[in-house]
Image (cartoon, coloured by chain):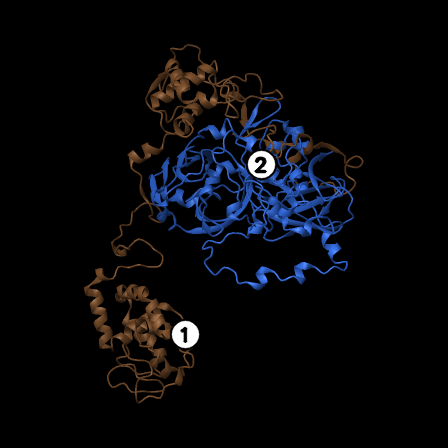
Chain colours: A brown, B blue
Amino acid sequence: MSKFLKFTASIVLLGAAWATNANAQDADAGEKVFRKCAACHAVGEGAKNKVGPELNEIFGRVAGSLEDFKYSKAMTKAGEEGLVWDHDSLTEYLAKPRDYVKGTKMAFAGLKKDDEIANVIAYLATFSESAEQAAAESESAPAAAPVETASAAEPAVNAADAVIPEHGVYHLGREALPEEIAAWDIDVRPDGVGLPVGSGTVADGGVLYDENCAVCHGVFGEGEGRWPVLSGGFDTLTADRPVKTIGSYWPFASTIFDYVHRAMPFGNARSLSADQTYAITAYLLYLNDIVTEEDFELSNETFSEISLPNEENFYPDDRLEEANFATNVEPCMENCGDGPAEIVMRARILDVTPDGDEENGAGGID
Amino acid sequence: MSKQPQKNKNFVPSRRSFLQGGLTAAGGAAVAAIGGGAALAAGTPDPAITELKDWNQYSGPGVDAAPYGVPSPFEAHVVRRDVPWLTADPISSINFTPLHELDGIITPNGLCFERHHSGVAEVDPAEHRLMINGLVDKPLVFTMQDLMRFPRENRVYFLECAANSGMEWRGAQLNGCQFTHGMLHNVMYTGVRLRTLLEEAGVKPAGKWILAEGADASGMGRSIPIEKALDDCLVAFKMNGEALRPEQGYPVRLCVPGWEGNMWVKWLRRIEVGDKPWQLREETSKYTDLMPDGRARRFTWAMDVKSVITNPSPQAPITHGRGHTIITGVAWSGHGKIKRVDVSIDGGRNWQHARIDGPSLSRSLHRFYYEFNWDGSPLYLQSRAIDEQGYVQPTKDALRAARGDNSIYHNNGIQTWYLKSNGEAENVEVS
């Protein structure tokens, strides 16, 4: 098989894509592009060979086949090996003539822009009966050539039919529907904004907690393994090992509701109803002595009565006031510190680097 | 392929396992003993040269043997690792970037550390939506295709977990910069400015905060002030040129340059604009910094200037003996570019300027080198970064003096590696 036949076989898909785009090419624009060719080539009524062959009926012509024109040996040979001029072969040839047919005597370097190539081919097609016919066929049977572009994009709708929204700067996206916002916007703030209508008691919550939560967080919120401890830890925040729980550390009760509702139980998120979430939240407040009665009912109405004891002990980031944040202080470069450095702490003492041993270090992340 | 020391799936080259032969992971017999290469040069012909190798004789696999290429089997030890005792369950856990195996500034996608709160969400991009609601002129929904039609930009940013080095607050604990500093990666993102999306919806004047929310089963959410949202936040869908990895938030994540990694919400599905912060779990019970007086800082977002020597380090001992030696590491700051890195080999008594090589970009890793002639004596290696704002990386003692032992997050203290005469390195603290 010659290289030209191979090429033709390999670009069947490209050809199909081209056919559907045939109308997009502009023969009128191609006439202007053809001015670059006209010094050597003639086309149209009465066209004669010049430095290059005349180009009437170029579509379907075997390369190097005009008897009254003296081709390069390379072009004659290409024709003998099967090169026939069509949309695809002309596209390749006009981009880089001397690459496509090595040894052609056409001195033209090639057209750089794809649209120039497409347009000049469309112009030449108007002087070829076979090309006109092919274009007509592809127009009359568009469904026969489904577009399978290499990018696997979805079949394009007619671009001109796309509806462009009026909003915004780029007019992209669409308006979110109220039902859609309601489905996703479940966040709850400390001021109660976002709380759904509902209610649940401590007693109800206890049952739900034992079923859904205790396996990880412990029956009394003490935490199993390294799962988060939820209760107790009072007055430990200045201790050597603080225990940060809802009662000892968390600033806002709304965080309990929000988190349980969006992310718990672990592995089955968003499975608790609003009422169930109120109940579990009430029970967690009970485990932390924030409420004391088992018949206490937490609801969107009573939520504002709840505050957590540690709320006032949070304050905004003030790291920049630390001494080590002083700027543009040139650090010591020579003879810093007192005497030679000496080791005061070694990782090998603890040796909790994971290497298969069952040793645990201090501090955790959860 | 059988040359890898695949003792077991969880093999980790700690200090001890290195001594037990883990060094062969670094590439074969040449590192079996210090000076091994030099001994060969003393007159015995090197079989690596004199013997015919398989790869020198037989053809290898053809193209497409691996349609998506993978590293050499000799690099099989270069992987993320976790510290099982840190967390209750691997589904809500973290692993660490092998910093000691990397060079330059870009972290390969498959080695970027993972932190999930309910595992990796497997999101079908065709069914993924990004919603903007709240205090906006018009709440909007975008498909992935919509997002990709906004003007894009490419930016390199580090992401550091606020808890990086958090296990070291009380003193040296983990032997390996992968474990002490590996909650860190540096990636070139392609995405759309969050500002562009917010302007498409139109932020109302009362909008002072945004909530960024993920599509995963933890419903990850963080409040971000509108100033930052309108500044440099990026809604990214590509990392290092290819689609985000699932564990990094495919198909789309938020980048909050210079700020703690928890805010870089993965599988980003919703931005809500509001007039107050939401005070969700990750910004109240977590990612708040407990101080010695029992009070706690909140909204400690920026990651401060920091650096670490990655080689040598406990997982990457020096095996070549004395002579010309390269110390290298990374430096970064959430406040901008790194202006300078100093290196000390005597535990901070004397410092020399390191050489920064490669791109110097704001809020991106910087690579530094310090080359010297090691005489084989024990050293205390430290690095100290200074950023363009003039902030100087502090000592761990200075941090403890200001914050005590229990603040967990934002430990940017100077790291010390004790380099021994045999080339091993250990995580220590010095006076």
Chain letter of disc 2?
B
Image quarter where the C terminus of chain B lies is top right
The quadrant holding residue A97 is bottom left
In the image, taking residue B158 as reference, residue A334 lies left or right, namely right
| Residue sitting at x 50%, y 24% | A228
Q: From where the camera sits, is residue A169 visible?
A: no
Circle 1/circle 2 CB separation < 8 Å: no
Q: Residues within 10 Å of mark 1 (few under 14, many from 20)?
A: some
Residue at image location 54% in from the left, 22% down from the top: A244
Instruction: Residue A122: give x, y in percent of width and height.
Output: 28, 72
Query: Which residue is tagged 1?
Result: A96
The residue under label 2 is: B164
The image quarter containing residue A155 is: bottom left
Comparing B153 with B397, the one in front is B397
Type of amino acid under label 1: Lys
Kind of residue sitting beneath label 2 = Asn
The image quadrant of residue B302 is: top right
As rendered, which of B143 and B419 lies closer to the eye? Answer: B419
